[in-house]
Image (cartoon, rainbow, N blue to C red):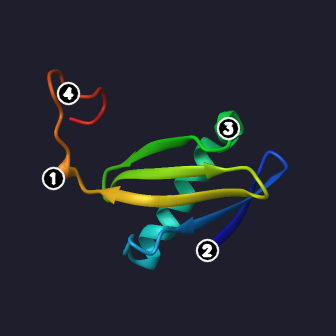
Amino acid sequence: MFRFSVEGEDWILRFSPQVSIEADEKQAILMSLLHIGDDLANFSHGSAFIMFAKKIGAIVFDVERIPSLILTVSNIVPEENWYIQGESIKGLK
């Protein structure tokens, strides 16, 4: 579990028990979140978003705002398990 602040809001980053990654990967996820910073304010309670990291894969975040500001990494999907129908997603390939 990590605590971080963005735009005056104190967030908690936690990892679902089903997500098994190394400490350096967790740190990389946290640093990526700091780069998107103020965009976190746009997510409402119960929403989710995906972040793509070349070395880690597609990272699925669940957003909680009640009772605290919590981001949970609920899953990580490595690139070899991505199935893209039609045109590739811009910036990934």
Looking at the image, is mark 2 or mark 1 earlier in the sequence? 2
> Considering the numbered disc 4 on the image, is that residue within a helix, a strand or a loop?
loop
* Amino acid tagged 1: Glu
Q: Quadrant of residue 45?
A: top right
Q: Which residue is mark 1?
A: 80
> Which residue is more in the foreground, 33 or 42?
42
Q: Which residue is mark 2?
A: 1
Question: Local crowd at mark 4 within 10 Å, few (<14), some, or many (≥20)?
Answer: few
Between marks 4 and 3, how big is the CA–CA gap?
Answer: 28 Å
Q: Is residue 5 above or below residue 1?
A: above
Q: Quadrant of residue 90?
A: top left
Question: Local crowd at mark 1 within 10 Å, few (<14), some, or many (≥20)?
Answer: few
Q: Which residue is mark 4?
A: 88
* Amino acid tagged 2: Met
Between disc 3 and disc 2, the foreground one is 3
Question: Local crowd at mark 3 within 10 Å, few (<14), some, or many (≥20)?
Answer: few
| Residue 3 x, y percent position in the rendering | 71, 67
Between disc 1 and disc 3, the foreground one is 3
* Amino acid tagged 3: Ser
Looking at the image, is mark 4 or mark 1 earlier in the sequence? 1
Between marks 2 and 1, how big is the CA–CA gap?
Answer: 27 Å
Q: Which residue is mark 3?
A: 44
Looking at the image, is mark 3 or mark 2 earlier in the sequence? 2
| Residue 31 x, y percent position in the rendering | 56, 58
The residue under the point 80% across, 45% down is: 7
Q: Is residue 33 left or right of residue 26?
A: right
Q: Is residue 10 left or right of residue 75?
A: right
Looking at the image, is mark 2 or mark 4 earlier in the sequence? 2
Between disc 4 and disc 3, the foreground one is 3
> Considering the numbered disc 2 on the image, is that residue within a helix, a strand or a loop?
loop
| Residue 62 x, y percent position in the rendering | 54, 51
Looking at the image, is mark 1 or mark 3 earlier in the sequence? 3
